Every structure is written in C-alpha cells, then in structure tokens.
Image: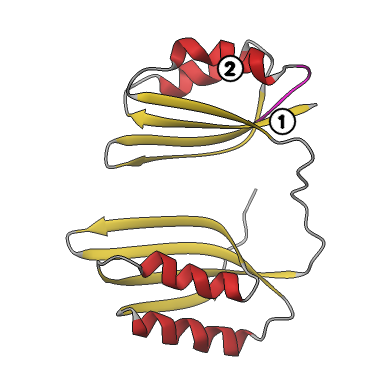
Amino acid sequence: MDTYAIAVVGRDRPGIIADVTGALAGHRGNVEDSSMSLLRGTFAWTLIVSFEDVDQGELESTLEPLRRPDLALTVHPLAGIDDHSTRPMTSLQLTVHGSDHPGIVSAVTRVIADHQGNVTDLSTKLVGGLFVVVAEFDLPDEVELEAFGEHLLAVAQDVGVVAHISPADSDLL
C-alpha cells in the first residue's frame, strides 16, 4: 500500500474537489483523511490518500493537468509513518481571543510544544480587529495540568489575549 499526503492550494472555484478526487479515483485512490478550508477566498486542502500500486511519478503525472498558475498541487510520500502513538495523552481544546497582532499563535503553541504537547487541529479567524484561535491538542498524561494551565494563561496575558482550556469533545464517528 502506498500512502501520500497531497496538498491543494489556490484560488477557489467550483469543481476543485471533484477534479482532484476524480483523478485520484482513476488510480483507485482511497481518501483516508482530509481537511479543507476557504481562507479569504483561497482554497486550502490536505488529503491522506492510499493506493494499491501507484508511484509518485504516476501520481504527479495524473495531477499535472489540474495544476494552474492559481492552483498548486504537491505530493508527499508517507512511507514508514506511524500515526498511532502508544503514549497516554489527554485531549484538550484551547480557545484564544484578543486584539490582533503578530505572535499570538506562536506564543500559545510554543507553550504546548514546550510541554511535549501536539496540536492536532488548529483554526484561526480574524474578524475586524478581533483574532480568534481554536486549537485541539494532546498533552502527555504525565504533564501536570494545573501547572501547564498556569503557564499557558501567563503567556496569553503577556501577549495580550484571553485563553481558555477545556477538555476536547471526543469525535462521534
């Protein structure tokens, strides 16, 4: 089984998803995971796709007709990547809001990384001058949650935003 990460970024228009998945289906590609957003009129989509027997060159050739000056497609092989950690983790959600300025995402995600946490989903939105961050992340069970929370809230205060940590909602799938 060959598995690839495929990134599609460019000016939004109708049919991008249908075109890309149609090309992948031509090689019997199975979309295992994907995430797509429109970011200020820019289409941004990442897919994890498995194939029975397709090499990267074939996949690149298949996707070539879909590439345009305003639409980029990149293919990354994922051989040998194991996505199943055996380390016990606690899933949390972080919500941050405040006046927009550079460095907010960097500051709060640095705290998570410094505690060996892993961001699993991140969304940001700028509405007027208000900047909002919503991040789901996993934190190793051995991390003291109270100390982590105090550190994160102190950093948030230093960068002039309000932060709230809560348990992540589990997927219903």
Residue at point 45%, 72% (across, down): 108
Q: Report whether 110 appears left or right of 163.
A: right
User: Mark 1 belongs to which amino acid?
Assistant: Thr
Can you tell which mark lies on residue 3? 1
In the figure, residue 100 lies in which quadrant? Answer: bottom left
Residue at point 37%, 17% (across, down): 68
Q: In which quarter of the image is the N terminus?
A: top right
What is the span of residues highlighted in magenta in the rendered image? Answer: 49-53
Which x, y percent locates residue 85? 78, 58
Q: Are marks 1 and 2 in contact (CB under 8 Å)?
A: no
Q: Report whether 62 appears left or right of 9.
A: right
Residue at point 49%, 77% (across, down): 165
Q: Say above or below: 42 vs 27.
A: below
Let me know if residue 81 is in the magenta part: no
| Closest to the observer, 11 or 113 | 113
Query: Is residue 167 at least partly visible in the picture?
Result: no
Q: Say above or below: 32 vs 135.
A: above
